[in-house]
Image: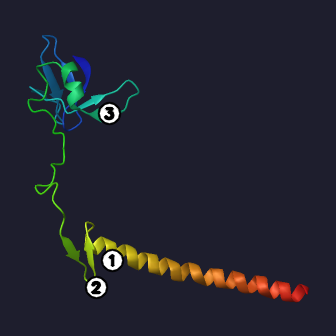
């Protein structure tokens, strides 16, 4: 029984039998043959998921049949055309950005102005009072 650096989807170590067949040991302690690699252990001991660029290094007997999917955003179907105007809940019309996100940002900006104005006023009043006291 020789351990390899590969693990299956449940995180069980993949071993090689004396005859060279890969297997994993189940929770019941029995051997389960024909495992598929999903994770691999690096030299520093951490575990990483298998990626497309690592598939060449995995033996064919335990290599995943399907390659991990690479998610790529497809371009808009109306790419190159002028985007239509979007009406916000408040009735204002915007272009491009979703109206809800823009409305939320504007509300947050207004709230920040109010909360930042109060300490600024207090600070300004303190300065004026100190100057009056010194003079």
Q: Would you say the residues marked 1 and 3 are in contact, meaning their CB atoms lie under 8 Å apart?
A: no
For label 2, the SS is loop
Q: Which mark is residue 90?
A: 2
Report how far apart the C-alphas of labels 1 and 2 lie in the structure.
Answer: 8 Å
Residue at 25 percent across and 82 percent down: it is 89
Residue at 19 percent across and 44 percent down: it is 72
Count of numbered tags: 3
Report how far apart the C-alphas of labels 1 and 3 lie in the structure.
Answer: 43 Å
- Residue 80: where, in percent of width, then height? 17, 55
- Residue 91: where, in percent of width, then height? 25, 85
Identify which residue, 75 or 2, lies in the foreground. 75
Q: Which mark is residue 103?
A: 1
In the displayed structure, 80 sits above or below 114; it is: above
- Residue 120: where, in percent of width, then height? 64, 80
- Residue 126 seen: yes
Q: Is residue 48 left or right of residue 76?
A: right
**Residue that carries the numbered disc 3 in the rendered image:** 47
Q: Quadrant of residue 101?
A: bottom left
Colour scheme: rainbow
């Amino acid at each position: 029984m020789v351990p390899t650096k590969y693990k299956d989807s449940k995180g069980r170590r993949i071993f090689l039998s004396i005859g060279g067949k890969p297997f994993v040991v189940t929770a019941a302690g029995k051997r389960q043959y024909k495992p598929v690699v999903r994770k691999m252990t690096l030299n520093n001991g951490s575990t990483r998921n298998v990626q497309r660029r690592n598939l060449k290094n995995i033996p064919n007997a335990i290599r995943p049949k399907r390659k991990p999917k690479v998610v790529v955003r497809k371009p808009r179907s109306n790419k190159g055309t002028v985007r239509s105007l979007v009406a916000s809940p408040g009735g204002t019309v915007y272009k491009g950005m979703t109206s809800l996100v823009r409305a939320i940002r504007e509300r947050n900006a207004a709230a920040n102005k109010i909360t930042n104005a109060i300490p600024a006023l207090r600070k300004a009043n303190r300065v004026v009072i100190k100057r009056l006291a010194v003079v």
